[in-house]
Image: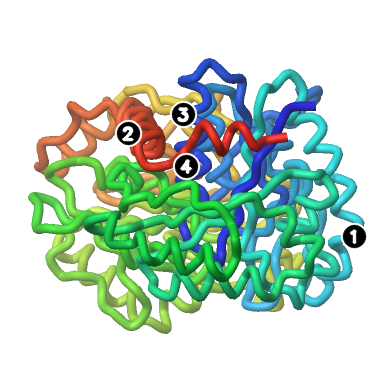
Amino acid sequence: MARAIMLQGTGSDVGKTVLVAGLCRAAKKRGLKVRPFKPQNMSNNAAVADIPGDNHHGGGEIGRAQWLQAIACGVPPSVHMNPVLLKPQTDVGAQVIVQGKVFGEARARDYQALKGRLMDAVLESWGKVGEGADLVIVEGAGSPAEINLRSRDIANMGFATRADVPVVLVGDIDRGGVIASIAGTHLILPEEDRRMIVGYLVNKFRGDVSLFDDGIKAIDKFTGWRCFGVVPWLKAAARLPSEDSVVLERLASGGARALKVAVPMLGRIANFDDLDPLKAEPQVEVVFVPPGKPLPADAGLVVIPGSKSTIGDLLKFRENGWDRDLAVHRKRGGHVVGICGGYQMLGRVVRDPDGIEGSVTEAEGLGLLDVETVMEPEKTVRNVSARSVPFDLPLEGYEIHLGRTTGPDTVRPSAIINGAEDGAISADGKVIGTYMHGLFGADGFRGKFLESLGVRGGGIDYRAEVERALDEAAAELETHLDCDAIFGLAR
């Protein structure tokens, strides 16, 4: 079995995902065969990964964070890197994905009872990820300090104690209270869990790191834990795909540019990293529009992203008045792109006769494309190579969706995927719908598409930018953390 070390946070959004990715890249640069692992993830930003031994179904779903961490390791992503993925559909329920496949739906209370059965899958995947590896770097979820959930935990100390993986605790100084959060975690953990922690690190420090020397002394006094270092705010993190929707408010490109792209922040927004390549373009400003705010009148392009609950988000879209904003945008000659659930919303109607998404089984669409969608139980999950029809350029991405979309506008497909037509384009060419995620990641297509909107784009190798950002993050961690000690404590 490979040696392993685990990063757990004092809370959510402390930066564990980027730290694990950076440490994975640092270990790879040292010549180690390294793999990522996250027992349980909750996110509607999913990626398509290999299902070892299954050549018939195209692939399975994992959190996009583990997809990024696999890239950092230089290995193909596997469903075993994230054996349990929860995709929230309502405020109280989620779709449960186990080892890449839909396991079922669960309300929050029911899921707590289900966790005991899921631990077997977690430990099976854990064994598979470690095969042939020198090191596995594990990411926790939420915080081990949620002791009310400890008895059935599979994401933090429940996993660490079962798999005997030492833990480095991560505190976030940017949100304040980092001394209390680390010392408080030490105070409330039961002894069995506390002894798993080999030390801590402080993340997202701005300014002179030496100013925190007294903070380290205070934490040492309360906990006796070793400090592995203080990590500055990693600028490279802004150039890496974000997984958790809690960061959406911070994701605007910033600064006026030649083209403003407006993205409504749907309640169950999914795979919003589809917008990252546009954010990387110097001439493009991406604005995520929160509920209650109108779509900006000066936007040249509106992108309606994916959704885990198309009908629910469509109803909220109207409640926000975004349907009226979008109609005005169209009258002004503005362009619209709908991806996956966003494509379904652009049609005349969305039907869900089996109630797959919930109790509302039909909703009027936005009517910008002459198509209609019927939800079907069979889920499409696959990586694809495709070709843009309007620009005759290669595309590469993935599909994760329920539903079949048909109608007159599909005679103008937006892409050819594996020989089959996909998507639809309006008669004037200004409204595009597609089921393919990753559309804007194709550099040639992105450049030509922006050119068609009157903006100079392209010249950016987006995937190379991600690789450079991972290298920069790894270099920063090597500078500010005692990586020798962290890797050396893996067991």
- Amino acid at dot 1: Gly
Disc marking residue 437: 4
Marked residue nearer the N-terminal end (1 or 4)? 1
The nearer-to-camera label among 1 and 2 is 2
Residue on which disc 3 sits: 26
Which residue is depicted at the point 51% across and 22% down? 28
Q: Position of residue 284 (x, y in %)?
A: 17, 48
Disc marking residue 472: 2
Q: Position of residue 144 (x, y in %)?
A: 67, 65
Nearer the observer, 225 or 428: 225
The nearer-to-camera label among 1 and 3 is 3
Q: Position of residue 92 (x, y in %)?
A: 69, 77
- Amino acid at dot 3: Ala
Residue lying farthest top? 31
Which residue is depicted at the point 28% across and 79% down? 293
Estimate how packed mark 1 is, as few (under 14), some (14 to 19) or many (20 or more) residues with alpha carbons within 10 Å.
some
Q: Is residue 368 above or below residue 128?
A: below
Residue on which disc 1 sits: 116
